[in-house]
Image (tube, rainbow, N blue to C red):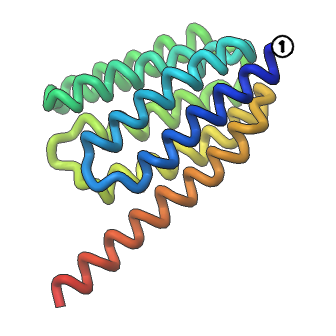
Amino acid sequence: MNRVVLANILTVIGELTLFVASSRPNKKQILFFQIICMALTSVSSFLLKGYSGVVMGVVGILRNVLSMRNIASRYLSYLFIGMAIVFGTLFNNNGLIGYLSILANVIQSLFILSRKTSTTQIRFACGFASTCWVVYNYAIRSYAGVFFSGINASSYFYHAFKEIRDNKKGGQ
């Protein structure tokens, strides 16, 4: 099987788990489904020679596992942001486009590793990160990634605004 086809199949499966994550009711469930997505899309990025995407997937998995175990702090957030920037830059083989995967990871790290972050804030961060992945995926020829990252960004934003609306209704 052609590596581009296999990579896109892995991306479809991974992005579908991310779609599920966008509608989960709490932070732990969101992070769990993101871990599955990052594992699959990291393999996909490797097959498509998007090495900064691979590194960002690994950093993201570690970040989410620690956050799920309630091991979070401002300093840990800075450590993961530093790791994303350093390792992402070292393994970037896609020029400026490669920095979008780093930006996506930094955005998510700022919010996921904070104990005070609401699910709404996480949804917005993931929506912005998914938007970065749309462009990155296009550059590495992960066309399924382009489509599903766009859908996932929309889904995260939809659920974030829905949560805000529902909270306003409940407060009246």
Instruction: Name the one closer to the observer, 8 or 1.
Output: 1
- Which x, y percent locates residue 131? 60, 48
Give residue 170's quadrant in the image: bottom left
Disc 1, SS: loop
- Which x, y percent locates residue 145? 69, 37
Instruction: Name the one closer to the observer, 141 or 97.
Output: 141
- Residue at screen point 75% across, 31% down: 142
User: Which quadrant would the C terminus be assigned to in this image?
Assistant: bottom left
| Residue to which mark 1 is pinned | 1
Tally of marks: 1
Give residue 15's quadrant in the image: top right
- Residue at screen point 22% across, 49% down: 117
- Residue at screen point 60% across, 16% down: 43
Left or right of 59, for residue 112: left
Left or right of 46, for residue 104: left
**Tag 1: amino acid:** Met
- Residue at screen point 53% across, 28% down: 102
